Image: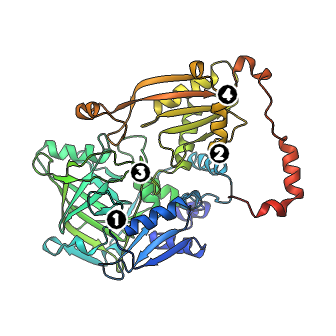
Amino acid sequence: MAKQAARQNSVVYGDLRDYLRIVEERGDLRRIEGADPKIELGTIAELMAERGGPALLFEKIQGYQPGYRVAVNVTVPPRRTALMLGINSEQPLMGMVSEWRLRLKTFSPVPPVAVKRGAVQQNVMLKEKVDLTQFPAPVWRDKDGGQYLGTGCCVITRDPDSGWCNVGSYRVQLHEPKLVGCYMSPGRHGLMIMEKYWKKGENAPVAVSLGHDPSLLFWAGSSMPRFGESEYAAAGWLKGVPVSVVPGPVTGIPIPADGELAIEGEVPPPWKESREEGTYGEWTGYYGHPRAPEPVIHVKSVLFRDDPINYGALPPYSLSKPSITSSAETWDAIEQAGFPDIRGVWIPTHSKGIVIVAVAQRYPSHARQVGNFVASTIYMGRFVIVVDEDVDVTNLDEVMWAVGTRCDPVTGITMMDGMRSSALDPRLSPEKRETRDFTNSIAVIDACRPYTWRESFPVVNRVEQDIREAVEKKWGELFESFKGK
């Protein structure tokens, strides 16, 4: 059955090394030697990400053994996101969103399978032999508060009541050879599980995978619908075959068997022990969470392959939850709520807190209701923009044109307060942060033609689509060199 699912699935890679091999064969990976891990490595990654360039594999990093490497920009921009998801990358963004929506309809979890031995066990360090300083832990940006060993990592915790293992994505800072810090935002499953141990006065067991199949990071950064659902099983569905895991030698927590590098340890209650952590440039594009005492992990074991690759993720560019999948899931939620004729949804990769929805209006309140629904469901949103179906939601120039010409600010903007935000929200006031009031306001912008007089709204000065297509077909060579740019 698993083999049959794999044949039906267009995901073609195995572990992280296999994924990078495929990317390199496509001419979309660059190997870089001799980078300084203090700021220079991260700056190279940032500049390349801004330009939509290739994935990067840093080798012979200054200060580290030649074989110890860091991979960055692994699943961005969208062409590599599509490869990770197993969808066609040779199509417009809305095509990718639509294809992912169709794939999600086939979702059926594939539980992980335990194996006796995996590649991650090629080298094992236990207890007094643990020394994390040998593995590349860059200072990614000039304002970072220290070295970060874990950025594209998966933090694995086991619920003490049910035995369920959660795979989350939280940053991990290197403090000492056997000590790291782990920041988890309030409300995250990993933190909720650790709190169960702490309430009993116990240390929480944890494992952290630092190099793995990129689909695992994708699901680790996703919000699974219900507490207790397995990110491992979701990754198994995406790949079409079960994820192979091995038990950690200290905690017994299942670790990706084909991973590059993993650590295990214990997290004491933070009121007993914590360490100043951060700051770190997060997915919001800001240093949103101030330097503060955070939980620590006492590392008891290190497992790693020969010549290990640390999976680096540089926010906001290397997101584990990309625009394609977030847009698809929001689109599905809108339709499942009963709203008809949704023609597109897009959450821009670098425009944090903005959701754009295209609708073919069917009744007077259609656009406004859709906007209000989206605002009530998104996490740390700022603006929901609803446009007509003639606007390409992935083209921000077109969206802003609609806002500037179809929205009347007095009647077209609705304010909603007390919405769900985050401790990483850069706009959270000091007073709210002190009282842990993680809420914000959202503006819903109706940038559609007014429904009651839409037929008399001025006509757009754009050539009809059938004429455009005929001209493009006739003059194909003229436009070919600009395809996709």
The quarter of the picture where residue 380 lies is top left
Q: Are marks 3 and 2 in contact (CB under 8 Å)?
A: no
User: Which numbered dot is residue 221?
Assistant: 3
Q: Residues within 10 Å of mark 3 (few under 14, many from 20)?
A: many
Q: Amino acid at mark 1?
A: Leu
**Residue under label 1:** 210
Expressed as whole percent of the image width and height from the top left, the position of residue 292 reads 21, 47
**Residue under label 4:** 406
Q: Quadrant of the C terminus?
A: bottom right
- Note whether residue 72 is visible: no
- Note whether residue 137 is visible: yes
Towards the viewer: 421 or 215: 421
Towards the viewer: 247 or 177: 177
On the rendered structure, is 15 left or right of 26? left
Q: Secondary structure at mark 1?
A: strand
Expressed as whole percent of the image width and height from the top left, the position of residue 113 reads 39, 62
On the rendered structure, is 429 left or right of 72? left
**Nearest-to-viewer mark from 3 and 2:** 2
Q: Amino acid at mark 2?
A: Asn
Residue placed furthest toward the bottom = 66
Give whichever of discs 4 and 1 has the lower sequence position: 1
Determine the residue positioned at 42% across, 55% down.
315
Give whichever of discs 1 and 2 has the lower sequence position: 1
Q: Are marks 1 and 2 in contact (CB under 8 Å)?
A: no
**Nearest-to-viewer mark from 3 and 4:** 4
Q: CA distance from mark 1 to mark 3?
A: 14 Å
Q: Quadrant of the N terminus?
A: bottom right
Q: How is the image coloured?
A: rainbow
Q: Secondary structure at mark 3?
A: loop
Give whichever of discs 1 and 3 has the lower sequence position: 1
**Image: 51 above or below 394:** below
